[in-house]
Amino acid sequence: MTPASIDLLQSILHHLTGVLPGDTGPLFALTRRLHLEEGEVYIREGDTARKLAFIEKGIMRVYAIKQSGDEATLFLRWEEQFIASHDTIIHQQPARFIYRALERVTLLEIDYDKLDTILREHPQFEPLRVHFLQRMIGEALKVVEDFVLLSPEERYLQLVEKRSDIVNRVSDKYIASMLGVTPVSLSRIRKRIYDRGKK
Amino acid sequence: MTPASIDLLQSILHHLTGVLPGDTGPLFALTRRLHLEEGEVYIREGDTARKLAFIEKGIMRVYAIKQSGDEATLFLRWEEQFIASHDTIIHQQPARFIYRALERVTLLEIDYDKLDTILREHPQFEPLRVHFLQRMIGEALKVVEDFVLLSPEERYLQLVEKRSDIVNRVSDKYIASMLGVTPVSLSRIRKRIYDRGKK
DNA sequence: GAAGCTAATTAACAAAAGATAATTTTCGCT
DNA sequence: AGCGAAAATTATCTTTTGTTAATTAGCTTC
């Protein structure tokens, strides 16, 4: 039985190009399904493997360890997003960040270099890559936009509004970090919002 | 005579794929060179044209007009970077931002939909698109990384260190905005750095 | 249900940033 | 050179955030 995430990717591809699900064999032949336990590390600092994964289920946390020793969460990735070390894939350098599962996670993984080969042999699949690269640019630019245009409080409110499911599944300290503030400050922001609410 | 920017793009393409400069006709046939005067707008709010441009010379500013009426500069783009409204190209919606030349600017422009057609007919050029999409992801993620990991002062210092040429060519108020602080605050940051320097 | 661990909140103070306005500097232009 | 506008700095005051530490809340496990 075809898993839902492959269905999804096939349907995106079909929508983009007209390629029928039945003809996507070469593309999905090299993917493998991977399960991570809660807390399990997927990519560690220094890794050089150029792997790309589609998140079927669960939330991943991408973080750095600062000189001071404590962690800083750069961003979270969740269902239907791709996750990959941009250091290894884009910059051809060892990963500087750690990619760890916050929950039990299911990934659909592929080796990026193999994917590259497949796409050269089968250019009809290329729009799928372009689609996801563009989506990742859009997502990253949205974060930049929010950092420039919104206050920490506004960024938090927006996140709660748009992804309350994620906020509820993740520790505040990780949310705080990706919003660019300390956990203490996020706690005060939450209090301010609450106090204002009861006026 | 072939302009330097086409040379550059051809050489990147050759490096990526082995395609010879002489065989890039279909790709560059649809490009056109465009000159903007200082202060001239390239894309305005509400525009829907899906155009993509390579900056040969000059600096572009991408900014929004807030409800309050004043402007917020999201980022700057300069030589050898691509500029495009991600709203129109990625999100298929009218541009929310304004793209304006800060200096006299020379662009190498192409219609993104036409480019798309060309790339379907000539898949051998596709790696060039992938290269630039990846580069844009890398650039955007770097900004996100800096917002999370660095203080405004550290972001400013890093910018001065890496792109003092850009800092010197652009008003501080635009630099401040893209760093996520007010011009007044940037002025204080500069003063702190200076005072520390003379100990 | 108590112990133990982590996350979240609160407190207290210092540092930084926002807002507004006044002042100085810079820069383009005639 | 000198005028005028815009940019940058400075000043003042308010708000927010960072830092550190103490306290409370929430969970897991025995």
Image (cartoon, coloured by chain):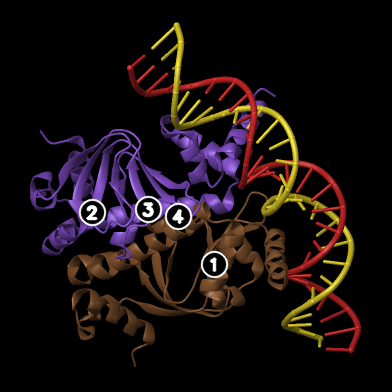
Chain colours: A brown, B purple, C red, D yellow
Neighbour class for label 2 at 10 Å: few (<14), some, many (≥20)?
some
The tag on residue A45 is: none
Q: Position of residue C25 (x, y in %)?
A: 55, 20
Q: Nearer the viewer, mark 2 or mark 4?
A: 2
Q: Secondary structure at mark 1?
A: helix
Crowd around label 4: few <14 · some 14–19 · many ≥20 (10 Å): many
SS class, disc 2: strand
Give the CA distance from mark 3 to mark 4: 20 Å
User: Where's residue B195, x and y in %?
Assistant: 66, 27
Q: Chain of mark 3?
A: B
Which residue is drawn at the image coordinates 34% and 54% (left, top)?
B45
Question: Taking A150 as reference, is D20 left or right?
Answer: right
Give the alpha-carbon distance from disc 1 to disc 2, as whole Å.
Answer: 30 Å
* Cα–Cα gap, marks 3 and 1: 20 Å
Element type where label 3 sits in the image: loop
Q: Earlier in the sequence, mark 2 or mark 3?
A: 2
Which residue occupies the foreground of this view, A159 or C24? C24
Pick whichever of labels 2 and 4 is earlier in the sequence: 2
Residue of label 2: B51
Q: Amino acid at mark 4?
A: Leu
Q: Quadrant of the C terminus of chain B?
A: top right
- The structure residue drawn at horizontal position 28% and vertical position 33%, both measured from the top left corner, is B104
